[in-house]
Image (cartoon, rainbow, N blue to C red):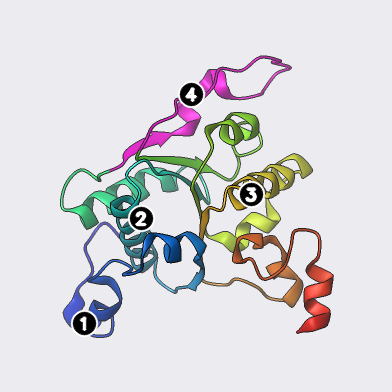
Amino acid sequence: RGKSIDMAKRPWLPRIYNQPFQVDAQGLHRRKVLLIFGRQCEKSTTLANMAMAMANLEPYLRLLYVTASETNIQDVKQELELYAGGPFPFQIMEVSSFKQSAQRSGRTEIEPLPKVDRGLYIVDRYNIAAYRQALRDVGFDALIGDEAHLLKNIEGAAAVKAWYEIQQDVLNRGGRFLYLTATPATVFDDLEQFIGLREWAPGFFEDYKARV
């Protein structure tokens, strides 16, 4: 962590990472990806690669990155800059820094989050419920779930509902999904949360299981 990937030690990586995803705008618009990794640096490289590829196709993209915990956010920012060789070409928005946009302590009115073109919004899974409405109002074009297997176990029904609703918003917009995880499922039902894969309609996972 904190160091760039040594390609000499991983000869299989250059053909995966050296070039961004080479697909046209329509094709990328429909892509959905569940990637399984064993190393954090390779996950971050894939995130950065895909974000930059999408930015080249659609310059007004807004991405939401849901990470495992607040302590991961600074690591993510550092690794993105290492990949880019300098400042990452997205404005990085730390959602938890906008305190007035959170629904806490009986607050009925919240301030909207800034809507930034070419913006990468980062929120940890423990804050996703508090910022649910503010995040939904941004209108994201892509959703990235890091340590995505943990998101099914977010503490509290409100957080689970927020994660599901935000995914569905992106799905309704025809957006893109990237789930990053080393252990996507221990049982088949664990996959149900990944509605961005578009293999089953929300609420119809049991029908999908019956087909496969």
Mark 1 or mark 2: name the one nearer the start of the chain.
Answer: 1
What residue would you read off at disc 3?
A: 172
| Residue at the image point whose x is 81% and y is 65% from the top | 204
Image-based side of 154 in relation to 45, left or right: right
- Magenta stretch: includes residue 94: yes
Viewer-proximal residue among 136 and 47: 136
Mark 1 or mark 3: name the one nearer the start of the chain.
Answer: 1
- Residue 115, percent across and down? 44, 29
| Residue at the image point whose x is 52% and y is 21% from the top | 99
Mark 4 or mark 2: name the one nearer the start of the chain.
Answer: 2
What residue would you read off at disc 1?
A: 9
Number of numbered discs: 4
The label nearer to you, 4 versus 2, is 2
Mark 4 or mark 3: name the one nearer the start of the chain.
Answer: 4
Amino acid on which disc 3 is placed: Asn
- C-alpha distance separating marks 2 and 3: 18 Å
User: Label for residue 194?
Assistant: none
Main SS category, magenta section: loop
| Residue at the image point whose x is 51% and y is 42% from the top | 140
| Residue at the image point whose x is 61% and y is 58% from the top | 150
Can residue 100 be spotted in the picture?
yes
Give the crowd class for mark 4: few <14, some 14-19, many >=20 residues within 10 Å: some
- Residue 158, percent across and down? 75, 39
Q: Secondary structure at mark 1?
A: helix
Q: Secondary structure at mark 2?
A: helix
The label nearer to you, 1 versus 2, is 2
Residues at discs 4 and 3 in contact (Cβ within 8 Å): no
Amino acid on which disc 1 is placed: Lys
Residues at discs 1 and 4 in contact (Cβ within 8 Å): no
What residue would you read off at disc 2?
A: 54
